[in-house]
Structure formats: C-alpha cells, structure tokens
Image (tube, rainbow, N blue to C red):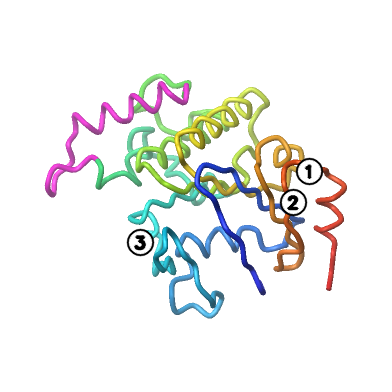
Amino acid sequence: MNDISFELKRGEVLGIVGLLGAGKTEIAKALFGVYGKGNDKLTGNIWFNGKNARYASPVEAVNAGIGYISEDRGGEGLQVNQAIDFNISLAALKHIRRGVFLDLKKEKAVNQKLIEKLQVKCESMKQKVTNLSGGNQQKVVIAKWLAMKPNILIMDEPTRGIDIGAKSEIYALMRKMTEQGMSIIMISSELPEIINMCNRCYVMCEGMITGEINETEFSQEAMMTLATKRD
C-alpha cells in the first residue's frame, strides 16, 4: 500500500471499495494493530481522538475501543467449535470482570441481551456456533464486538455468504449503531451495499486510494472507473 490517507467521522458509515487484491483488508488490519508498530508493512501515522493510534497489537486496539469483523468468519472471527456465549464474551472480558474473576451473572445477562437484540436463532447460548446458519454465525461475530462497546467498528465483507433476510437485519443494525454515535468502516466488494449503506466511500486500486465519493455522487460506474484507475 502507498499514500493511504483518509478520515473517519463520528456516526458515519465509511465505505472502502475496490477489486480483489486492491488492499482493502490490509487497511483494516493496519488500523486494528495486526501489523504492529515496528512492522515494515506500515509507516506513517494513525490518529484516533487526537491520540497516536499506531497500535502494537489487536489487544491495544480493542482496549482503545476499536472492533474488527474479519472477512474470514470461521478462521478469524469465531471459535466455531465453542458455544455462542463463549464467543460473544471473547472481546468483552474487561466489561464483565469483577476484579480478576468473571462476573458470570453479568456475562449471562450481556450475552442474552445481545442474542435477543440481534435475533440470533439458536436453541440456547450454549449451542456450538458451528451448528448455526451462516447468517446467525455472522450475528454472533457482531454480538462479540458489540459486547465490548466499540467506538469504531471495522466490518470487512460483513454480509458475505449470508441470505438476503440476514443482510437486511445487519444493515438495520448498522444504522442503529451509527445513530448512537458509533463509526463504521465498511469494506465490501459489493457495490450496491456500499451505495445503500455508506455516507462516503474511498475507492482503491493496487494498494492506493484513487478517489473519494460522497453519497450524493454514488454510482457503480464512478466506483468502477476509480477501481481500475492506474497512475
């Protein structure tokens, strides 16, 4: 990636779009601390609320209030052979602890509330994630990050591989989250959902941002022109 520069505003959905291999996921991982401070894949500065946000690890990013929904739901987003409640609690341990111990009553209450809020179809919160549909697995991933109360949520291909009904529910949830002040970075290869969901979008081609488009100027043609633009 080269010369990547952009800003994210409070309460907006910012889209990042581009063809396969454009570098979209690399931006997400850089923001989430995957590359660390000393990694040569990342130079320059990242600022969050006026503070340096070059996180050394994802743990630092989570502690700062940043969540990341990976495009690889089964490999990176979930422990599929574990229960729903186990997965939801993973990123929110500091919110459900009492001293050095988990507050099991609070954990159960938080998990149950999120399962109901996201309408996860399951037999119980003890059901293994691997036995859920793709749409419900994705809801568990989202619930995991909502449990840690992020200020920024990075969503990489958040509706890939799920049915239309589940997509609509996730879109509605995203709108509610931004109404409450959360900022979302939505990375997607589906241009219609970028047009439908985002306030602005940056288009990438071969590791570079080739343009910014406001929602009043959204069109698939404009996005594809920038997505295939080479200097």
- Tell which circle, 3 or 1, labels the residue nearer the N-terminal end: 3
Q: What residue type is labelled 1?
A: Phe
- Tell which circle, 2 or 3, labels the residue nearer the N-terminal end: 3
* Residue at image coords 48%, 35%: 177
Using the image, determine if residue 158 lies above or below residue 70.
above
Q: Mark 2 points at which residue?
A: 213
Question: Which region shows up in magenta?
Answer: 96-119
Q: Mark 3 points at which residue?
A: 60
Disc number lying in front (3 or 1): 1
Percent position (x, y) of residue 139?
50, 32
Q: Residue 218 carries which label?
A: 1
C-beta proximity under 8 Å, tags 3 and 1: no
Taking 81 as reference, is 137 left or right?
right
Q: Which amino acid does label 3 sit on?
A: Glu
Q: Residue 196 carries which label?
A: none
- Tell which circle, 1 or 2, labels the residue nearer the N-terminal end: 2
Q: Residue furthest left?
A: 99
How far separated are the C-alphas under marks 2 and 3? 31 Å
Does residue 103 belong to the magenta stretch? Answer: yes
Q: Which of 75 and 160 is in front in this view?
A: 160
Of helix, strand and loop, which one carries label 1? loop
C-beta proximity under 8 Å, tags 1 and 2: yes
* Residue at image coords 51%, 50%: 75
Percent position (x, y) of residue 46?
49, 67
Q: Which of 167 and 83 is in front in this view?
A: 167
Taking 223 as reference, is 51 left or right?
left
Using the image, determine if residue 199 lies above or below residue 22.
above
Of helix, strand and loop, which one carries label 2? strand
Percent position (x, y) of residue 201?
69, 50
How far separated are the C-alphas under marks 1 and 2? 6 Å
